[in-house]
Image (tube, rainbow, N blue to C red):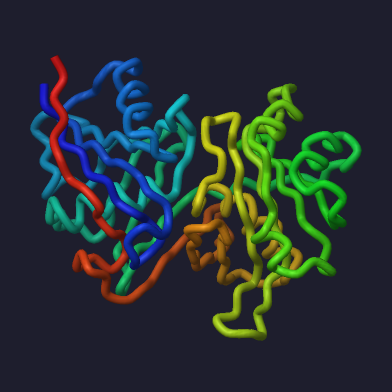
Amino acid sequence: MEIELYQLDAFTNLPFKGNPAAVCPLMHELSDDLYQKIAAEMNLPETAFLIKHNPSDDFTTGSRFRLRWFTPTNEVNLCGHATLATAAVLFQYKNNVNPVLVFDTRSGEVAVTPQGDGYVLDFPLNPPTEQDPNEFRDIIKAAVGDLPIQDVYLSANTKKLMVRLADSCDRSVLTSLKIDPILLQSSEKTGKVKGLILTMKGSPDSQPGYDFYSRYFAPWNGITEDPVTGSAHTVLACYWTKKLGKKKMLAYQCSSRGGELELEVRDDGRINIGWTGGHCPAGNNHTVATDTCSVQFD
């Protein structure tokens, strides 16, 4: 059995930046065990499996597919960058003719629309609730040490804990943080947290005008640090839209690879996550393909 596989860098227009994902377009479902083995072999933050609803469906003319995401260790409910990469495979390499693509996932329907030089992801919002920092003092200590923090919020639905650094902290403080993934994972074993978001207020008055910054760590899901995380912004946008009084925001995830996200919080409980950029060497304005191949299984 041969499986077609694409590897792309999403949320960037430069090679080796943004967030890498593998995409496997499939004619039919495989076993969960095989999905996980392929994802572990790829050893990327996410591997996306794109599955036809019916054998008669076509990747060029079809507008609705099933989509599943796996980290090297487990399946996840929602992933932004691998969804963007999947849409890029369909639009750029399969020449899909539809104006909108809809994917059925463990988080319900998600959609992708080409817009200008980029794509817009239509995702569900995941509002967090404020928490007592003392209840999470071990994980906070493991992550930021004695740095001052301003807010602690938890999205119970996604199990993402959001910790906001105090406004007295400079962006360089967040960027330069060195986090021990083993210590971080061992600091939280209740199952309440599967991902840690660190965030801080941005500099909207300075070009390019980022409203907030973030980093994301998920050793509980086999990811030391995720470079650019669409799903984390379904939590972050809920928090920052209230704090800043803005529906449209520009965010930057300041990992070593880095990535920019355009956000629009909607009134229907969903969010548009967009990315727009210039021309890239691969001739693809929204993702950079670093490899395409077929893998064979006995």
Residue at (52, 31) in percent of width and height: 222
Residue 83 image offset from top left, x and y in percent: 36, 47
Above/below status of 83 relative to 262: above
Lateral position of residue 48 relative to residue 213, left or right: left
| Foreground of the two, 297 or 66 | 297
* Quadrant location, the N terminus: top left
Above/below status of 282 relative to 65: below
Lateral position of residue 80 relative to residue 267, left or right: left
Residue at (50, 52) in percent of width and height: 227
* Quadrant location, the C terminus: top left
Residue 35 image offset from top left, x and y in percent: 32, 24
Residue 56 image offset from top left, x and y in percent: 8, 33
Picture quadrant where residue 135 is located: top right
Residue at (32, 76) in percent of width and height: 278
Residue at (40, 60) in percent of width and height: 17
Query: How many numbered badges does the structure rendering display?
Result: 0
Residue 103 image offset from top left, x and y in percent: 33, 42
